[in-house]
Image: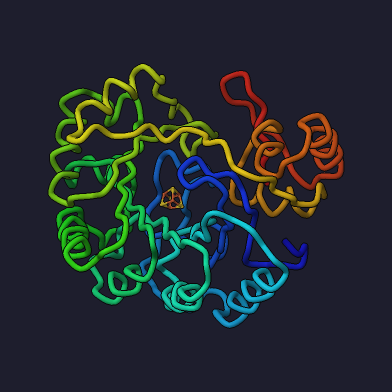
Amino acid sequence: MNDSCRYLFGPVVSRRLGRSLGVDLIPAKTCSISCIFCQLGPTRNPTLERREYVPTEQVIAELRAWIRAGGETDFITLAGSGEPTLHLHFDRVLKFLEPHPFRTALLSNGTLFTDPAVRRGAAHADVVKLSLSAWDRTSFERIHHPHPDLDFEPMMKGYRDFRSLYRGALWLEVFVVPGLNSGEEQVKRIAARAKEIRPDRVQLNTAVRPAAEAGVRAASPDKLQRLAALFDPPAEIAAPRAHGGTVSLPLSAQTLTGILQRHPATAAQLAEMIGHPEEAVRELLEDMVRAGRCHTREQKDETFFTR
Ligand code: SF4
């Protein structure tokens, strides 16, 4: 990727998609909710305002240049540092990509799927991943601290309506937070809500990076495995995937900064994402810390680098 790209990042190796070129349509941490597990920290002012947060034509120009330069990836993914469907024209980016030989994905918290225009726009993606970590209004509010105008049941109706019109792959992501939604009865209730939506896949995730709220822990692999069996058909565990081919991103402070402002990561995770030896990545990260270009955060005996 060209270092001058403002709206593209990666390709990074994503736990869900393999090699994924990210498209970030939203300024840092612009979101409709404030998940307690968010790796980007709390959302200061949750918003429901849909507008052109970044210039659509510039995003498309960056994609066009990346494609012309022979970029390779498994997916091009609308994701990044906030909720992508808040961007009024996210669908134009998906439509631009339709004739190109890349699969597209939209990773959304789903809260705006009450809006028919958002559902129609999302239907242009090959894969749509929506969040479902709650089973009712109370659990939704506890886990996601939503904008005050959001409500859980209308969102569920939006999910069902989307399923009725969408022919692509609909995935649900259940983020398991021990002590909040990890009990067997709680997960059975989430599984029942998931069934209403008829997803193609359900994936369980948990906090592998520092979370917005202190005290949010990761569920153990054994626990996730047991909970996955409560879904019908059983859920998958979102786990790191090997990628085929080499990701040839330059080992530069700019590359690492582009990733770290969206994904806090360990040196090992960054090394895997950009395809360079861990030692070389670690040395550069330490230089960046000394220069004040990133900082560190400890979690569970691991050092995460973040912006
Ligand atoms: S995890 Fe995603 S949906 Fe939740 S607050 Fe962070 S950016 Fe928003």
Q: Is residue 60 above or below residue 231?
A: below
Q: What residue appears at the point 84 percent right and 39 percent down from the top-left corner?
A: 284
Foreground of the two, 137 or 190: 190
Tally the numbered discs: 0
Residue 192 place in picture, x, y as percent:
13, 39
Which quarter of the figure has residue 292?
top right
Residue 78 place in picture, x, y as percent:
49, 62
Which quarter of the figure has residue 2?
bottom right
Q: What residue appears at the point 53 percent right and 61 percent down from the top-left corner?
A: 76
Residue 53 place in picture, x, y as percent:
52, 74
Q: What residue appears at the point 16 percent right and 31 percent down from the top-left corner?
A: 188
Image side of residue 53 versus residue 190, left or right: right
Q: Is residue 288 above or below residue 168?
A: above
Image side of residue 286 versus residue 235, left or right: right
Rendered image coloring scheme? rainbow
Q: Residue furthest bottom?
A: 57
Q: Is residue 84 above or below residue 172?
A: below
Residue 77 place in picture, x, y as percent:
50, 59
- Tell me the quadrant of the picture where the N terminus can be found: bottom right
Foreground of the two, 42 or 127: 127
Foreground of the two, 274 or 57: 274
Image side of residue 1 versus residue 127, left or right: right
